[in-house]
């Protein structure tokens, strides 16, 4: 099945305009004929049709996203398979990815970035509480709407507590530039790894470059393990520097104990302002929840 304008998915969702292309799928604007609404449809790329590994990843994304209901997570509406391909139907999030904003601006000041990070932390905490680790937090997977709401997208390589990784032993998932040191060494993905990846994202936005580089993906992964964190510039407020450095601790035990705790640390900085931040308040019980359980390898 080749994604194209006019294609009808599940007898219900008509593709109208391609929005984006990723390594695994194409994202299309689509019309829900039954409810008369506009949605986003993620469809496997043509060359991956019939590839059971990628179909399995799409099913995993559907399974892990199905129970997530949070203002800072893009909502899954439907899932199906057709002609050897698979698709996800999600709420259409109109806005700009953080990657596009960063490319356009070069850097993002702390006063603007911190509210984005707080919302991302809250969305991640909702996923972690549901037993899901994202494993691919990066600027392209955060969308900022016109009213400042942050939406986390793309749970394509996420892992649930009772799911076995769909990779060979010793193989890691995720983007090397945002890979937590413990995962680079082959350890299990945990919520602390998502906090670390968000820390890399924060550093990149504040400085205009990522903290660790290398000639190959392997070099970059091991730089996360072995190289000290380059200092953040003095132009970044001291309390924000301290919060980001904690997120980027090599030892997961030295990071904030949860994404929710990380949100609170960021909110306590002088750069956390009400303007531009539409983070949903956590459920009252969430304030007292223990850190989410790690995901089994």
Image (tube, grey):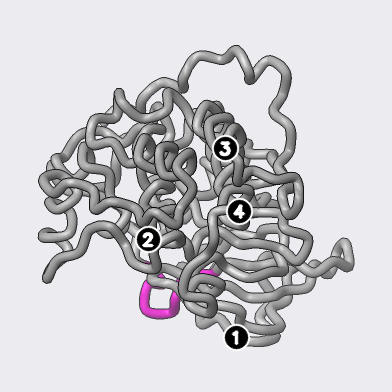
Tell me the residue that label 1 is attached to.
4
Q: Is mark 4 on a helix, strand or loop?
A: helix
Q: What residue is shown at x 78% (from left), y 73% (from top)?
A: 31
The answer to whether 225 appears left or right of 205 in the picture is left
Residue 171: % across, % down: 17, 48
Label 3 neighbour load within 10 Å: few <14, some 14-19, many 20+: some
Q: What element carries label 2?
A: helix
- The answer to whether residue 82 is visible is yes
Residue 47 in magenta?
yes
The answer to whether 213 appears left or right of 195 in the picture is left
Tell me the residue that label 4 is attached to.
111
Q: In which quarter of the image is the C terminus?
A: top left
Judging depth in this view, the residue of 128 and 42 nearest the camera is 128
Q: Quadrant of residue 15?
A: bottom right
Q: Earlier in the sequence, mark 1 or mark 3?
A: 1
Tell me the residue that label 2 is attached to.
54
For the residues labelled 1 and 3, say whether their Cβ atoms are less than 8 Å apart.
no
Judging depth in this view, the residue of 44 and 173 nearest the camera is 173
Q: Earlier in the sequence, mark 2 or mark 1?
A: 1
Please name which of the two marks, 1 or 3, marks the residue nearer to the observer. 3
Label 1 neighbour load within 10 Å: few <14, some 14-19, many 20+: few
Q: What residue is shown at x 73% (from left), y 76% (from top)?
A: 14
């Amino acid at each position: 099945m080749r994604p194209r304008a006019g294609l009808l998915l599940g007898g219900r969702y008509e593709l109208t305009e391609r929005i984006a292309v990723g390594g695994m799928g194409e994202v299309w604007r689509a019309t829900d004929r039954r409810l008369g609404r506009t949605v986003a449809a993620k469809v496997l790329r043509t060359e991956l049709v019939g590839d059971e590994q990628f179909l399995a990843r799409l099913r995993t994304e559907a399974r892990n996203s199905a129970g997530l209901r949070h203002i800072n997570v893009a909502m899954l509406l439907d899932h199906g398979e057709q002609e050897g391909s698979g698709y996800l139907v999600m709420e259409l999030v109109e806005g700009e990815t953080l990657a596009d904003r960063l490319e356009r601006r070069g850097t993002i000041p702390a006063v603007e970035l911190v509210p984005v990070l707080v919302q991302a932390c809250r969305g991640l905490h909702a996923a972690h509480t549901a037993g899901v680790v994202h494993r691919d937090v990066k600027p392209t997977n955060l969308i900022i709407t016109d009213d400042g709401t942050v939406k986390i997208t793309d749970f394509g390589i996420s892992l649930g507590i009772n799911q076995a990784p769909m990779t060979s032993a010793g193989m890691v998932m995720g983007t090397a530039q945002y890979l937590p040191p413990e995962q680079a060494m082959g350890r299990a993905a945990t919520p602390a790894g998502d906090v670390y990846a968000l820390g890399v994202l924060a550093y990149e936005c504040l400085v205009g470059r990522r903290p660790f580089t290398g000639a190959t993906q392997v070099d970059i992964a091991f730089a996360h393990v072995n190289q000290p964190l380059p200092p953040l510039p003095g132009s970044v407020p001291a309390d924000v520097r301290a919060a980001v450095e904690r997120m980027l601790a090599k030892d997961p035990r030295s990071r904030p104990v949860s994404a929710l705790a990380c949100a609170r640390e960021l909110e306590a900085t002088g750069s956390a302002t009400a303007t531009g931040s539409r983070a949903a308040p956590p459920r009252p019980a969430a304030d007292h929840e223990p850190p989410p359980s790690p995901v089994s390898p």
